[in-house]
């Protein structure tokens, strides 16, 4: 039995791992070509494809300037085609999925863009890229094309002494594109552009962390090398194994691992390895989405990285913070951090800040490190004293307003509280059963404030504001919010009147009902309290009097019993059979209140 269970478990695991990953694709073998076609449709004026090759060219190039070419395997988007444009790349050479482009394609790109100013090839440090780009460069040189190469190798995951392959080229390559591209656009010579690119390479480091490994398009099963409790630190942009695996860490712990590793990997200076940055150094950081992380996660990680970099332990200042997708690994759930030391390097800073037309480049919000971050200061909240005495109260032209209001409110709250069983009965059939109790709570609270004198009756502006406060403190639920909205709108509407008489009071009722419809989304015929409120408000505006308004409210409430559908509230979920014959309890409550008010006239 145990052997059978073991075999069954292994079989289930095998079947789970063999579930084909979901991707938005057609035929995976055509995906690179279709990806390029998609780019050309998105950027009809900005990009062009080189005939017979998966090479994308910037449609507009200045032939008097040095031309920059980069590329590599597809799957790192927006790298490299996203960097095409003035101030960055002239050509992007697209290989197959995670595969170096061919020598012939790289050479074709060189020939298509070569000018007397020369060409700079920017190569990520992978064996295939070095060999194929290098061979193309040599062939181009034989053809008389002025050409230089730069190999980017800023990954800090591997020890400097491990093998001859050296560190990999990862997201920091984008910084090199930007700095060298800006130098070329500024008219610098090929030697000057290459020197700035090398300077940038010498002053930066990167490290990636993945929650899950990458599954390439066309794979028959999901790459489950990392289980649900394990992450990988220092992996490459093709999903290569990193420097170590680890239990899941918090964002702060991941950031600490990234920063400390990059710092200690260091940089070469005068033949020695020194920390990448020191206390007080100005940095640019790039928090790169490896493809499957949310913007929410990326912002949290960026915050963690900055808090650590600018802590007492390190004391650096990040004047430029780039966060987003720059060098991805398809849909890998993870991120990388690149740190570029800008201290005492004004030319690097100028080139990093220069304008580019590359569609994927995101200019950052530069902080002047000599001052406090403006965003670190919270704008003081404007506190308004909402006491009734502070409300704007236009002149009142209604005699004995206070006495009349007390009589009417008392009658309405008494009747509403008495109607709780009826409202509960109706709401049990067509809602969630709480309408009666909710209305009773509101009525009881208003009555209590009326009795103890905390409901202001000296003026309609303060009275309606007080009713809104009472409803807010007692009712809850959707009905409570809607009635509070109505009373607050009635109060604010009256506060803008020159004076307040019967006509203004009637228009305030209409304004309150309109607010319920606007914010609640329902209207006449939605099978809600508005089926009683809207016709009664119309009667008020027409100065038909409270008796007519009450009759209209009752007629509207009764009409809801024959409505087969509801477009709002809990009744929206019920069938016609469930609704038929039972009126909406909210509309009935309005009818009861209006009838009580009319009885006092």
Image (cartoon, rainbow, N blue to C red):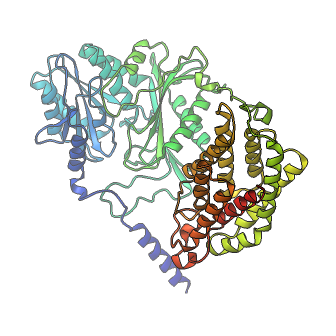
Residue at the (56%, 77%) spot, across then down: 580
User: Which one is nearer the viewer's eye here, 353 or 431?
Assistant: 431
Q: In this view, does 38 lie above or below 381?
A: below
Q: Which residue is drawn at 83% across and 49% down?
A: 406
Quarter of the C terminus within the rendering: bottom right
Which residue, as the protein is rendered here, is positioned at the far right? 452
Q: Quadrant of residue 70?
A: top left
Q: Is residue 333 above or below residue 554?
A: above
Please indicate whether residue 47 sits to the left or right of residue 525 in the image. Answer: left
Task: State whether residue 405 is above or below residue 394.
Answer: below
Number of marks present in the image shown:
0
Residue 422 visible: yes
Quarter of the image with the N terminus is bottom right
**Image quadrant in which you'd find residue 24:** bottom left
In depth, the one of 574 and 14 nearer the eye is 574
Residue 234 shows in this picture: no
Q: Where is residue 491 in the image (x, y as percent from the top left)?
A: 69, 41
Is residue 279 rendered to the left or right of residue 172? right
Q: In which quarter of the image is residue 17?
A: bottom left
Residue 570, image x, y percentages: 59, 66
State the image coordinates of residue 101 (x, y, percent, origin top left). Answer: 22, 41
């Amino acid at each position: 039995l145990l052997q059978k269970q073991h075999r069954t478990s292994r079989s289930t695991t095998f079947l789970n791992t063999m579930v084909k990953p979901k991707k938005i694709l057609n035929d995976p073998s055509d995906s690179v070509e279709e990806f390029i076609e998609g780019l050309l449709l998105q950027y009809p004026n900005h990009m062009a494809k080189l005939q017979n090759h998966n090479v994308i060219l910037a449609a507009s190039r200045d032939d008097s300037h040095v031309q920059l070419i980069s590329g590599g395997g597809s799957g790192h988007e927006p790298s490299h085609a996203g960097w095409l444009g003035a101030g960055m790349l002239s050509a992007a050479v697209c290989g197959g999925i995670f595969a170096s482009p061919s020598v012939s394609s790289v050479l074709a790109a060189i020939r298509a863009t070569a000018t007397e100013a020369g060409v700079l090839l920017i190569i990520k440090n992978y064996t295939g890229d070095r060999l194929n780009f290098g061979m193309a460069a040599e062939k181009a040189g034989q053809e008389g094309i002025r050409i230089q190469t730069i190999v980017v190798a800023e990954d800090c995951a591997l020890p400097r002494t491990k093998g001859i392959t050296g560190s990999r080229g990862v997201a920091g390559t984008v910084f090199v594109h930007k700095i060298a591209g800006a130098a070329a656009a500024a008219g610098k010579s090929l030697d000057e552009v290459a020197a700035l690119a090398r300077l940038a390479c010498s002053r930066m480091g990167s490290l990636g962390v993945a929650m899950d490994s990458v599954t390439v398009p066309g794979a028959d099963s999901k790459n489950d090398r990392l289980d649900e409790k394990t992450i990988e630190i220092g992996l490459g942009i093709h999903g290569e194994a990193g420097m170590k695996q680890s239990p899941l860490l918090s964002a702060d712990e991941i950031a600490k691992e990234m920063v400390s590793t990059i710092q200690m990997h260091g940089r070469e200076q005068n033949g020695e390895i020194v920390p990448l940055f020191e206390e007080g150094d100005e940095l640019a950081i790039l928090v790169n989405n490896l493809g499957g992380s949310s913007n929410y996660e990326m912002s949290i990680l960026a915050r963690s990285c900055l808090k650590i970099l600018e802590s007492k332990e390190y004391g650096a200042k990040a004047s430029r913070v780039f966060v987003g997708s720059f060098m991805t690994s398809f849909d890998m759930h993870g991120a990388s951090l690149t740190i570029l030391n800008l201290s005492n390097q004004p030319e690097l800073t100028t080139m990093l800040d220069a304008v580019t037309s590359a569609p994927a480049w995101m200019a950052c919000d530069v902080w002047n490190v000599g001052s406090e971050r403006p965003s670190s200061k919270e704008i003081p909240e404007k506190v308004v004293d909402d006491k009734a005495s502070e409300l704007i109260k236009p002149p009142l032209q209604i005699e004995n307003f206070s006495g009349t209001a007390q009589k009417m409110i008392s009658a309405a709250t008494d009747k509403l509280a008495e109607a709780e069983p009826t409202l509960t009965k109706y709401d049990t059939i067509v809602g969630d059963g709480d309408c009666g109790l909710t209305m009773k709570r509101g009525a009881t609270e208003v009555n209590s404030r009326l009795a103890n004198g905390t409901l202001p009756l000296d003026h309609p502006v303060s009275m309606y504001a007080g009713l809104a406060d009472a409803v807010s403190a007692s009712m809850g639920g959707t009905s409570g919010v809607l009635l509070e909205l109505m009373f607050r709108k009635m109060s604010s509407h009256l506060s803008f009147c020159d004076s307040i008489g019967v006509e203004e009071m009637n228009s305030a009722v209409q304004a309150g009902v309109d607010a319920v419809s606007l914010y609640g989304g329902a209207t006449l015929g939605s099978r809600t309290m508005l089926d009683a409120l809207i016709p009664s408000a119309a009667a008020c505006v027409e100065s038909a009097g409270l008796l007519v308004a009450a009759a209209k409210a009752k007629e509207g409430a009764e009409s809801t019993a024959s409505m087969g559908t509801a477009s709002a509230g809990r009744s929206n979920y019920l069938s016609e059979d469930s609704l038929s014959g039972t009126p909406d309890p909210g509309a009935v409550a309005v009818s009861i209140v209006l009838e009580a008010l009319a009885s006092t006239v």
